[in-house]
């Protein structure tokens, strides 16, 4: 990414979700950066209309997981073909995620100044570590395969006691866990994301669902367990050359509801492919979505299933094991 003066920019935030909430609360606000929400019809966009925002560009926008016919700017995203992080796999989840892309952008904006560099690290609660190494200016996995860091600057003096030593900034664990959860949760649960601990990720997911639905931690945990048991009691159906669990008969409410998020979490933990039917907003059409699928199952969804069901505006990412489309209403 090229260096920009971020004080002159306005970040446009897409639909609310745990990653977007963390971006706003733990990065943009502490750094005092300008931001506003992508809007449609006087309300903040939802996942179903985040790329149909009515915001109008003024020439200084950075778009985070949103867009619109009159909204242009630098894009931070990883959900759609052509996005900076779309094609990156689980081993590069940190730089693929929107959180990772944003962290690199804000760090690059101040890396020419030691004072600003370490002041930024303090504001974002990022530790610094001795024995930093010179290298590409991007977030990378350290030699222990447990920490994600950004290459540091040379300091004339630092607490390590060695003049001129490079010191890296360490990406906080909460950012790492959320990045993995948002970019490739199934792969993270399958322990394919370096530096991510399964139990901590599971706790983060339950906490995110609790916060998003305003339910307590135990209520969410019980609901997730209920859906986990559903995967054991239901029989999968044929889907191309594979098998899927069909939950399209269940009313999961609307938007990021407790039933929807709990089923999604249970399905991801199980590692089984499944189908759901859901409406993300009051005035939006219902979507049918396939998750935890193999690339061949994703292709079957697009080539056969979607046509049989009359789905429109289909979307998919074989690398992230999902596909979906909207029912005509």
Image (tube, rainbow, N blue to C red):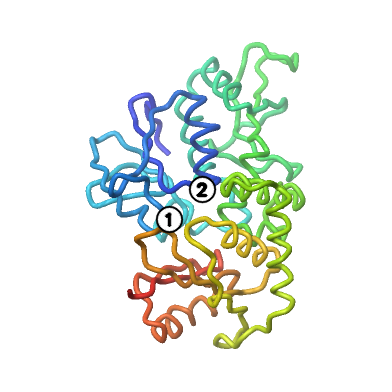
Residue 284 falls in which quadrant of the image? bottom left
Q: Residue furthest top?
A: 157
Name which of mark 1 and mark 2 comes first in the sequence.
Answer: 2
Q: Residues within 10 Å of mark 2 (few under 14, many from 20)?
A: some
Q: Quadrant of the C terminus?
A: bottom left
Question: Is 260 located above or below residue 139 in the figure?
Answer: below
The residue lying toward the viewer, choosing from 68 and 226, is: 226
Residue 47 bears which disc, if any? 1
Q: Is residue 238 left or right of residue 59?
A: right
Disc 2, SS? loop
Residue 110 bears which disc, if any? none
Q: Quadrant of the N terminus?
A: top left
Residue occupying image coordinates x 75% and y 49%: 197
Residue occupying image coordinates x 57% and y 49%: 213
- Is the C-beta separation of discs 1 and 2 under 8 Å? yes
Spatial CA distance of label 1 from label 2 is 9 Å
Q: Is residue 223 left or right of residue 108?
A: right
Question: Is 180 located above or below residue 87 in the figure?
Answer: above
Percent position (x, y) of residue 115?
A: 54, 15
Residue occupying image coordinates x 60% and y 69%: 292
Percent position (x, y) of residue 73?
A: 31, 42
Q: Residues within 10 Å of mark 1 (few under 14, many from 20)?
A: some
Disc 1, SS? loop
Percent position (x, y) of residue 106?
A: 48, 31
Residue 17 bears which disc, if any? 2
Residue occupying image coordinates x 65% and y 67%: 267
Residue 188 falls in which quadrant of the image? bottom right
The residue lying toward the viewer, choosing from 280 and 58, is: 280
């Amino acid at each position: 990414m090229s260096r920009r003066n971020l004080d002159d920019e306005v970040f446009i935030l897409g639909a609310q979700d745990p990653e977007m909430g963390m971006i706003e609360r733990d990065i943009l606000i502490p750094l005092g950066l300008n931001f506003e929400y992508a809007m449609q019809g006087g309300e903040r966009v939802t996942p179903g209309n985040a790329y149909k925002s009515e915001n109008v560009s003024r020439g200084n926008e950075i778009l985070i997981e949103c867009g619109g016919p009159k909204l242009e700017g630098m894009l931070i995203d990883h959900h759609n073909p052509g996005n900076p992080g779309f094609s990156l796999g689980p081993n590069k989840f940190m730089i693929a995620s929107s959180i990772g892309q944003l962290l690199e952008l804000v760090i690059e904006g101040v890396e020419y100044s030691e004072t600003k560099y370490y002041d930024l690290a303090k504001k974002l609660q990022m530790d610094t570590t001795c024995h930093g190494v010179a290298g590409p200016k991007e977030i990378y996995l350290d030699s222990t395969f447990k920490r994600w860091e950004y290459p540091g600057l040379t300091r004339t003096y630092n607490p390590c006691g060695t003049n001129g030593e490079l010191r890296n900034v360490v990406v906080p664990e909460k950012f790492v866990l959320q990045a993995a959860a948002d970019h490739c949760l199934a792969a993270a649960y399958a322990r394919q994301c370096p530096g991510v601990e399964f139990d901590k990720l599971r706790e983060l997911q339950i906490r995110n669902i609790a916060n998003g639905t305003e339910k307590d931690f135990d209520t969410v945990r019980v609901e997730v367990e209920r859906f986990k048991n559903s995967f054991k009691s239901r029989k999968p159906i044929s889907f191309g050359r594979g098998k899927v669990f069909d939950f399209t008969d269940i009313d999961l409410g609307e938007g990021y509801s407790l039933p929807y998020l709990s089923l999604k979490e249970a399905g991801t933990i199980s590692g089984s492919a499944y189908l759901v039917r859901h409406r993300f907003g009051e005035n939006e059409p219902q979507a049918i979505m396939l998750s935890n699928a193999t690339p061949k199952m994703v292709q079957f969804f697009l080539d056969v299933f979607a046509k049989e069901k009359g789905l429109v505006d289909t979307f998919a990412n074989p690398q992230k094991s999902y596909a979906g489309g909207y029912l005509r209403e």
